[in-house]
Amino acid sequence: MDKLVVSIYDPIDYRKEALHITFDLWSRKWHFEYIAMPFQEPEFVRTYDEEKGIEKFDNFIDMIKW
């Protein structure tokens, strides 16, 4: 399984203001985790059906105002 990490920082700090996205091939579901601050639990954790992944990604980007 691979992971995509999207952030506003360059270079990316995967522990701060980062959206981690994975896709489970067996269940055909997207898993989103947004980590706002280091050493804290993710602020946003959601799982979506396969066909909703792009829509939910766009919604998240709009919501967080990136």
Image: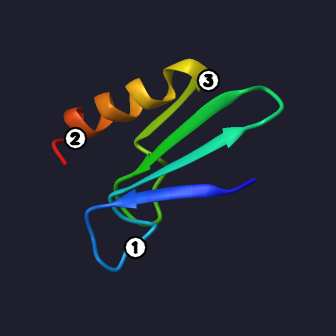
Question: For the point 78% across and 36% down, which residue is it?
Answer: 25
* Residue under pointer 2: 64
Q: Is 34 on the left or on the right of 23, as rendered?
A: left
Question: Can residue 36 be seen at all in this image of the molecule?
Answer: yes
Marks 3 and 1 close (CB-CB < 8 Å) = no
Q: Is residue 51 above or below residue 18?
A: above
Q: Residue furthest left?
A: 65
- Label 2 vs label 3: CA separation? 22 Å
Residue situated in front as seen by the camera: 33 or 52: 52
The mark found on residue 56 in the picture is none
Quadrant hosting residue 22: top right
Give the color scheme: rainbow, by chain, secondary structure or one colour: rainbow
* Residue under pointer 1: 13
Where residue 48 appears, as percent x and y from the top left, is 56, 23
Which class describes the residues within 10 Å of circle 1: few (<14), some (14-19), or many (20+)?
Answer: some
SS assignment at label 1: loop
Marked residue nearer the N-terminal end (2 or 3): 3
Q: Residue furthest bottom?
A: 11
SS assignment at label 3: helix
* Residue under pointer 3: 50
Q: In front of the other: label 3 or label 1?
A: 3
Marked residue nearer the N-terminal end (3 or 1): 1
SS assignment at label 2: helix
The amino acid on which the numbered mark 3 sits, given as a three-letter code, is Glu
The amino acid on which the numbered mark 1 sits, given as a three-letter code, is Asp
Marked residue nearer the N-terminal end (1 or 2): 1
- Label 1 vs label 2: CA separation? 17 Å
